[in-house]
Image: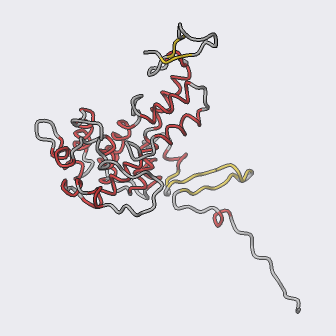
Amino acid sequence: MAQQNLHAAPAPSPKDLIHTAIWDEAPEADNAFATRSARLRGYDVYGEMVGNARWVEMLWLLLRSELPARPQLDALEALAVALANPGPRDASVHAAMCAGVGGSSAASALMAALAVGAGRSGGAREVHDAMTMWRSCGPDLSAWAAYLAGRRQDVVDVWPEAAHVPGFDPHGVSTALPVRQLLATLTELGAGPYTAWLHAQVSLGREDHARAAVGLPLAVSGVAACVFNDLGFSPDEGEMLYLLLRLPGAAAHALEQGRTGFKHFPFYKLELDPAATPSMQLREAA
C-alpha cells in the first residue's frame, strides 16, 4: 500500500463543539473552565442584565430570541405569581411535603413535585393538551366539548388516556373564585385576545358558557394554557413552564415540613393506639 501524506486536521474550537443559539460564553484567559462573559441572545448577562432586567425577562429570553411588548411580560409575570404556590391541597405540593417530612434531600422533594405534577389531571401534561386543544379548536365551545371524542386513540403515548376535557376541573361544580380573579387580572393586563374571550365566558354576573358547554368548570391549568397560547408559546414550552413555575411553593412547603416534623403534618396525624399490641403499632387518627 502506498504511503499517504496525512496531515492532522486543526483542532476544533470550543465554539465548534459547544453551540447554542441561546447562550454564548467566553472563558477566562487563565481558566478554560471559568466563564469571563456570558451573553443571552446577545445581552451581557452579568454586565448588563443583572441588576437591570426582571426575572421574567430572563425567563422569556431563554425561550425566545427577542423580548415582547410590556403587556405580555406583565401577563407572564402575573401568571407566574399565581402559579408559584399551588398550595398543600395540590398533589404535587403534597408530594414535596411528604418528602420533606420524611427527611429526603432537597432534590428528592423537587423531583417528587415534578413527577406528581407532570400528569394529565391538573398537571403539566394537561396544560400541553389544553394548548393543543386551543390550537385545534380555537374559541369554539362546541368544538371543545367534542375534542376528546375526536382525538385519535390509536396514537402510542406514555401518558394515560385523558379522562376529561383538558383545562377543566373534573371535581368542580362552579368556576372557583381565584380562577375568575386570575382571568380578570390577566385580561386587564392585556395577555391576549383568547384570554379576553375566555374571561367573557366565565365572568361574574353572567352564565358560565364554558361550563355549560363542556360540563365542567374552568381550572387554573386551563387559564395557564390559554395565556401561554396567547403569548405565543408552543404546547411543549407551556408544559415546561407549568412545571417550572409551580416549584417554588413545593420547595417552601417541603422545607416547612422538614422543620416541623411528622407529628405536625397537616393532613394525617398518627397517635398511639391504646389497644395496640406491645409492638406499639400506630394507627391513623380518626
- 50 with respect to 79 (left or right): right
Question: Relative to the observer, which residue lies in front, 82 or 17?
Answer: 82
- 174 with respect to 110 (left or right): left
Question: Relative to the observer, which residue lies in front, 282 or 20?
Answer: 282
Please tell me how many numbered marks the rendered image carries.
0
Q: Which residue is depicted at the point 38% across and 38% down?
A: 83
In terms of image quadrants, where is residue 279?
top right
- 130 with respect to 216 (left or right): right
Q: Position of residue 42 (x, y in %)?
A: 50, 57
Q: Residue furthest left?
A: 206
- 178 with respect to 124 (left or right): left
Q: Where is residue 155 in the image (x, y as percent from the top left)?
A: 42, 63
Q: Which residue is depicted at the point 25% across and 59% down?
A: 137
Q: Which residue is depicted at the point 45% across and 54% down?
A: 63
Q: Which residue is depicted at the point 47% across and 34% down?
A: 248
Residue 122 against residue 94 in the figure, above or below? below
Question: Relative to the observer, which residue lies in front, 219 or 31?
Answer: 219
Q: Position of residue 151 (x, y in %)?
A: 32, 60
On-image quarter of the N terminus: bottom right
